[in-house]
């Protein structure tokens, strides 16, 4: 009897993420205007959300005598990344949407800045000291999240930002990639909890922004990896 269809290692997985994220930008599902080609949503533009993040990450990056090589996995429209580049030895910005990366390459120019179009769940990741993953994992299935986490042990520092519910919640409920986030299931990602059990040496909360109208919390955590 063929049991391969029940073996997750042998299942041929569809990867809807690239198509879903491309559609988000093409149809402006995260907002924006006709004058703006690419817009990564309020979470990448609202001052109350992004200013604490930029301040906290800048403080972390500038604490090192030798600047770090930073990999921004899911860089979006680069409204945030452009404020951090100057504090790094090298900044490698990655996103899955080809047209977005092409736009960013022509818009943002720094000698130590690179843009790459990669699916971070399936591709080899650039080498570096520190990874930024800002409100990216929340859009992905547990299968893809696990694939990404498996690659992060090669970095010394991992800074993850997630949109989580207010109060207590059951973490890590699975979703279909690109179809909303876990908040719709009153859930959110916690990479230290099952099924991920991400192993770290140390963790520190950098920011926590409570959104109005009970819309949850945007939380950023720094993990020092073994």
Image: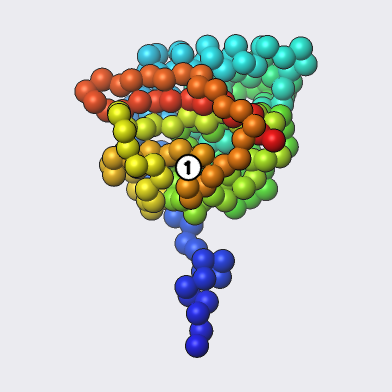
Q: Nearer the viewer, residue 47 or 208?
A: 208
Compared with 141, 94 (above or below) is: above
Q: Residue at x 60, y 11 (%)?
A: 59
Q: Residues within 10 Å of mark 1 (few under 14, many from 20)?
A: few
Is residue 83 something one can see in this rendering? Answer: no
Quarter of the image for residue 37 reads top left
Q: Residue furthest right?
A: 66
Quarter of the image for residue 16 reads bottom left
Q: Nearer the viewer, residue 130 or 204?
A: 204
Q: Position of residue 210 (x, y in %)?
A: 33, 20
Q: Nearer the viewer, residue 110 or 87?
A: 87
Name the quadrant of the C terminus. Answer: top right
Q: Residue at x 58, y 46 (%)?
A: 148
Compared with 48, 15 (above or below) is: below
Q: Position of residue 50 (x, y in %)?
A: 44, 18
Q: Is residue 217 left or right of residue 67?
A: left
**Helix, strand or loop for disc 1:** loop
Q: How is the image coloured?
A: rainbow
Q: Residue at x 29, y 40 (%)?
A: 186
Mark 1 = which residue?
Answer: 193
Q: Position of residue 33 (x, y in %)?
A: 33, 27
Is residue 110 something one can see in this rendering? Answer: yes
Q: Position of residue 111 (x, y in %)?
A: 73, 21
Q: Residue at x 51, y 84 (%)?
A: 2
């Amino acid at each position: 009897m063929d049991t391969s269809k029940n073996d997750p290692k042998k299942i041929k997985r569809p990867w809807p993420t690239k198509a879903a994220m491309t559609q988000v930008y093409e149809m402006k599902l995260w907002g924006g205007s006709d004058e703006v080609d690419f817009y990564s949503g309020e979470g990448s533009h609202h001052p109350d959300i992004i200013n604490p993040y930029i301040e906290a990450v800048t403080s972390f990056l500038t604490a090192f005598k030798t600047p770090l090589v930073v990999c921004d996995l899911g860089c979006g429209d680069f409204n945030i990344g452009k404020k951090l580049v100057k504090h790094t030895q090298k900044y490698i910005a990655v996103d899955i949407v080809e047209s977005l990366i092409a736009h960013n390459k022509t818009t943002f120019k720094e000698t130590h800045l690179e843009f790459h179009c990669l699916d971070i769940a399936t591709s080899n990741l650039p080498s570096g000291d520190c990874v930024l993953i800002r409100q990216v994992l929340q859009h992905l299935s547990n299968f893809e999240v696990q694939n990404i986490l498996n690659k992060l042990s090669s970095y010394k520092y991992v800074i993850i930002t997630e949109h989580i519910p207010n109060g207590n919640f059951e973490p890590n409920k699975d979703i279909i990639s690109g179809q909303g986030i876990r908040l719709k299931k009153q859930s959110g990602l916690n990479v230290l909890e099952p099924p991920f059990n991400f192993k770290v040496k140390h963790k520190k909360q950098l920011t926590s922004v409570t959104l109005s109208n009970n819309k949850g919390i945007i939380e950023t955590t720094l993990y020092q990896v073994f």
